[in-house]
Image (cartoon, coloured by chain):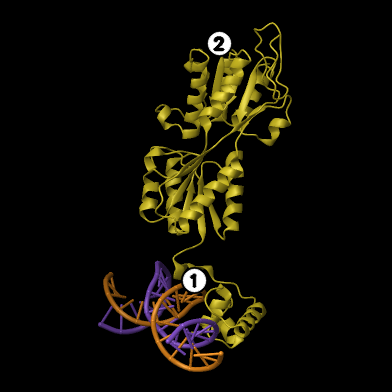
Chain colours: A yellow, B orange, C purple
Amino acid sequence: MKTSERANSQPTVSDVARAAGVSRATAARVLGGYGYAGSEARELVLDAAKRLAYQPNQLARSMATGRTKTIGVVVADIENLYFARAIRAITDTANANGFDVVLANTDENVELERSAVRVMLAKRVDGLIVSPASSVDVDHLVEARNLGCPFVLLDRRVPVLKADTVAIDNFPAAREAVGTFVRSGHKRIALVSNSRFEGGQKYLTSPVRERLEGYKAALHDAGIQNDPKLALFGGGNNEQLAQKLRKLCQSDERPTAFLAVTSAVALVILGVLRDVGLSVPDDVSLICFENADWTVAVTPPLTVIAQPIKELASAVTERLIARLQGDLKSQAKETLLSATLISRGSVSIPQLFESRGRDTGNTPPSTS
DNA sequence: TTCCCTACGTTAGGTGGATG
DNA sequence: CATCCACCTAACGTAGGGAA
């Protein structure tokens, strides 16, 4: 059956070639921008393509090349601001390099992640960008690699995979944040996360684990004994986290400072503080990871640890594209980007001190 | 039921003609 | 003979039709 005889079919290279009076191959080379083509033939082909509103058939192209020019992105939570911003930058970078993006959400669930990777492989994506839910259950990623589908890890490190990774250097960032509390005179400092903690620290995602380690290191630096009750984990449930926080805030062992591992957790903390009648920074100091827009719109504006999400996501995409464009031999590379503490107004000297101060900028609070 | 063949649209390598 | 250009065609992976 001839192409032109099929009903409802879009014009193909054959149609363009026939309309232009050249061979199929010549038309294909002009339209594909490869190989030789005379200027006269080129003009005829482009004119015919315009007349027929020709659009390349990506399915056929993929069949011939074995490439789909598609990148699969598997992240834990697309509602999370951090990932939303990352996806935006990944899409921009991918598009600029001629790639499309297919997205999957896993809700931090390894089974969903496994299934998402399977779907991506079935769709024959050229490569994957993954923010793995687990640093232990990664057999599906090993399988993807064995099937010739390269991947780069976004934000989370999984040493056992020896994979290209682009992440934030969380340890010093958390250490600096806690150090800021310490320098203001805080001794009871809590770390708050909404992660699951069953099975212990090794089951935490690497950013949370590294922030926890940075937190502990800063306490150690200051000679403050680590109180396990002050590391709070919500188990993926905001209400459960709020309950734990409420209980802690109403106890005699109430912390005077909170380090939130995400801006979403900071929102939960602010809600609880309002409920129990505590204010920031007079009663409690607060620093959170993520420079979310709302953190400057609240009173006081929050001191945050800003992460270079755009750079992170661009770097991860560029790394994958480099792999796809032939860099299959070079060793896996781990890139760590620095986070920056931005001092605003949510850290002050704890209540037990006679005088109060507040960080109003980059200068340390007065202790006079 | 199983096996083989063809169609789909494009790419890419091989071939050969025209020209200087 | 070298270079440029255009044509021809195998191959890609899968669905579906027809033959055995």
Element type at mark 1: helix
Q: Name the residue under label 1.
A: A60
Tell me the crowding category of disc 2: few under 14, some 14 to 19, or many 20 or more residues within 10 angstroms, Cα based: few
Tell me the crowding category of disc 1: few under 14, some 14 to 19, or many 20 or more residues within 10 angstroms, Cα based: few
The label shown at residue A253 is 2
Q: In which quarter of the image is residue A204?
A: top left
| Residue occupying the point 57% across, 61% down | A98
Residue A350, given in percent of the width and then of the height, sits at 65, 12
Q: Looking at numbered disc 1 in the image, what kind of residue is underneath it?
A: Ala
| Residue occupying the point 46% across, 39% down | A133
Q: Do the residues labelled 2 and 1 touch (CB within 8 Å)?
A: no
Residue A12 visible in the displayed image: no
Residue A240, given in percent of the width and then of the height, sits at 54, 26
Q: Looking at numbered disc 2 in the image, what kind of residue is underneath it?
A: Glu
Nearest to the observer: residue A105 or residue A161: A161
Is A190 located above or below residue A144 in the figure? above
Q: Earlier in the sequence, mark 2 or mark 1?
A: 1
**Are the residues under badges 2 and 1 in a single subunit?**
yes
| Residue occupying the point 55% across, 55% down | A101
